[in-house]
């Protein structure tokens, strides 16, 4: 894969972004890539601390999110001296969404190139949900550049294609194209034991795409990246992770990618995060498991204070 890299700084709302419903907490910057002969802008935040400890953290978001939802975690890290890089992965958020062969390898490489452009040699990688799969892939590809690894309720702790029925990309695209604000909200409600009004902003962040004139293409990219999760498991490679790892598992999480395609019996059998967390801890040689009772799929939103305490203790 030939990749050309360019770099420039943009204003808070990049040219061409319309119908924005949420305001990112820090200025957005843009990193230009050429992949499969297509030029694309990867948007990210780069937050530097008042007093640096010389270390950098990069935050990887989940599939139904973007960098915006890290807004309450970033200050806790910069206050401790960390520089924090928060990308919207290519295909998500304010970044471009070209139709490509999406893979965790490609996304990991994009982030490596971004760090190269910023002259950052080593990072602690924190990934939530799908971002956990990406963080694991990054650590596997670039162990020498990964200081520590944090997996927050990652998906992919089991191989979905072994029990979730296959759907063609065209079928998934039709479902993605039919998405509404209400369908996004209903899915996000499953992430929490109890829904609260303050969670609405994260639905708004995801739903920005619905008003994008290019939504048809975005729906296709959403379908492609669903297949990426389905077809590209990392669960078999966890024993190869060598960097110090923190595994944070909200015990009330029952997320399964493709859950709506399962029988009730299967829904009760799979997606059991309390069991999966213990299993994965045993597979990663230097792994600390922290179990959070009563917490669902997004600990850093549901109980930010507790998550920050756990995270900073590990760091």
Image: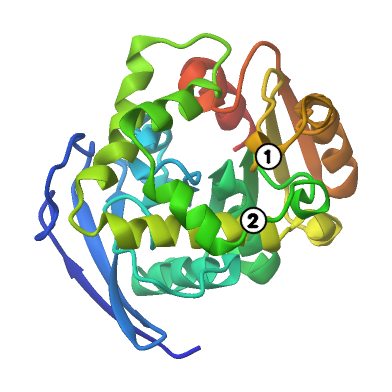
Residue sitting at 57 percent across and 47 percent down?
130
SS state under label 1: helix
Q: Residue at x 88, y 38 (%)?
A: 279
Q: In which quarter of the image is residue 171?
A: bottom right
Q: Distance between the residues labelled 1 and 2?
A: 9 Å
Q: Nearer the viewer, residue 22 or 83?
A: 22
229 sits to left or right of 101 = right
Which image quadrant: the C terminus? top right
Question: Is mark 1 in CB contact (under 8 Å) with mark 2?
Answer: yes
Q: How crowded is mark 1: few (under 14 residues within 10 Å), some or many (20 or more)?
A: some
Q: Name the residue under label 2.
A: 167
Q: Taking 187 as reference, is 315 above or below it?
A: below
Would you say residue 54 is visible in this rendering? no
Q: Can residue 179 be seen in this view?
A: yes
Which quarter of the figure has residue 246? top right
Q: Name the residue under label 1.
A: 261
């Amino acid at each position: 894969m030939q990749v050309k890299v360019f770099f420039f700084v943009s204003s808070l709302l990049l040219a061409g972004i319309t119908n924005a419903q949420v305001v990112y907490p820090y200025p957005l910057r843009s990193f230009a890539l050429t992949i499969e002969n297509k030029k694309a802008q990867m948007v990210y935040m780069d937050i530097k601390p008042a007093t640096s400890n010389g270390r950098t953290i990069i935050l990887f978001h989940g599939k139904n999110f973007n960098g915006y939802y890290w807004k309450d975690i970033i200050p806790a890290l910069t206050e401790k001296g960390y520089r924090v890089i928060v990308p919207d992965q290519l295909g998500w958020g304010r970044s471009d969404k070209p139709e490509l062969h999406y893979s965790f390898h490609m996304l990991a490489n994009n982030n490596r190139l971004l760090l190269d452009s910023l002259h950052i040699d080593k990072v602690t990688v924190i990934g939530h949900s799908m971002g956990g799969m990406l963080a694991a892939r990054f650590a596997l590809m670039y162990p020498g550049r990964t200081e520590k690894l944090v997996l927050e309720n990652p998906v992919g702790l089991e191989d979905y294609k072994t029990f979730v029925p296959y759907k063609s990309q065209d079928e998934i695209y039709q479902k993605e194209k039919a998405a509404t604000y209400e369908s996004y909200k209903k899915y996000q409600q499953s992430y929490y034991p109890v829904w609260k009004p303050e969670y609405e902003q994260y639905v708004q962040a995801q739903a920005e795409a619905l008003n994008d004139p290019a939504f048809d293409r975005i729906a296709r990219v959403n379908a492609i990246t669903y297949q990426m999760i389905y077809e590209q498991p990392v669960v078999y490679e966890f024993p190869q992770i060598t960097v110090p790892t923190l595994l944070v598992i909200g015990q009330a999480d029952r997320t399964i990618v493709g859950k709506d395609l399962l029988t009730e019996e299967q829904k009760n059998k799979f997606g059991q995060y309390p069991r999966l967390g213990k299993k994965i801890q045993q597979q990663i040689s230097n792994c600390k498991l922290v179990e959070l009772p009563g917490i669902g799929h997004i600990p850093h939103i549901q109980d930010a204070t507790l998550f920050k305490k756990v995270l900073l203790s590990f760091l």
